[in-house]
Amino acid sequence: MSKELNFLILKSKKGNQRAQIKLYDLFCEAMFFISCRYLKNEEEAKDAMQDAFLKAFLNLESYKEDTSFGSWLKKIVINTCIDVLKKKKIETISLDNYPLEVLDDNDWNFDVRIDKKEIIEAIESLKIKYQLVVKLYLIDGYDHTEISEILDIPEKTSRTQLRRGKMELRNLLKT
């Protein structure tokens, strides 16, 4: 971590608003981009991002310097976006009674003629329960344990929703 960033975090922990504004300025663009991945409406994404910054500044004491500040903040932003989606009553179902489906984590290869934009558009068209798991896993790099904690679902459900989302994604990208 750079000395300047460390200094800003220390000052922000003490309630220095100028330092908090500088931290906000350093990270707001990246965090807004992350919010937009989860929330379709830009105003909702902006509100969620700002709520996440507020939560972060109120809980700076819980930040541990052994992780990057950006990663810590990103997790808060994602959780805030998911809270917004939950408030909209997005249905997540427990799949405890369904058989576990094995997922080959290395099987994410798509036709090379498909560009990134097409893949992102296809992900956006998935059912929301699949979309969240696919984004958290594929784009944000969380594992199933972390996804289950973030979405408050069993790990088995995360794995199943990822597999089903991947199958839907493949079907969408074939057409």
Image: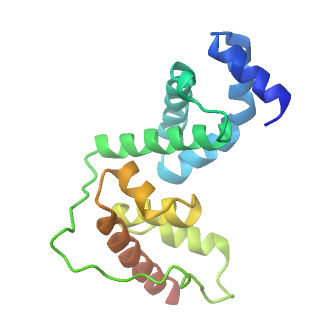
Residue 17, x across and y down, in percent = 67, 11
**Residue located 55% across and 67% down the image:** 138
The residue lying toward the viewer, choosing from 113 and 157, is 157
Q: Quadrant of residue 71?
A: top right
Q: How many marks on residues?
A: 0
Q: Which colour scheme appears in the figure?
A: rainbow
Q: Specify the quadrant of the image occupied by residue 20.
A: top right
Q: Can residue 175 be seen in this view?
A: no
Front-most of residues 48 and 147: 147
- Corner quadrant of residue 88: top left
Q: Residue at x 31, y 50 (%)?
A: 152
Quadrant showing the N terminus:
top right
Which residue: 37% across, 83% down?
Answer: 102
Residue 125: percent from the left, percent from the top? 44, 68
Farthest-out residue, right: 3
In the displayed structure image, the side of residue 97 where residue 13 appears, left or right: right
- Asked whether residue 54 is in view, the answer is yes
Task: Name the spot of residue 86 as percent of width and height, x first.
Answer: 31, 45
| 55 relative to 156, above or below | above
The residue closer to the viewer here, 90 or 97, is 97
As drawn, is 165 to the left or to the right of 59?
Answer: left
* Residue closest to the far left: 97
x then y, percent, for residue 143:
49, 62
At 68% from the left and 27% from the top, the residue drawn is 24
109 above or below 34?
Answer: below
Residue 106 or 67: which is nearer the viewer?
67
Lateral position of residue 93 relative to residue 63, left or right: left
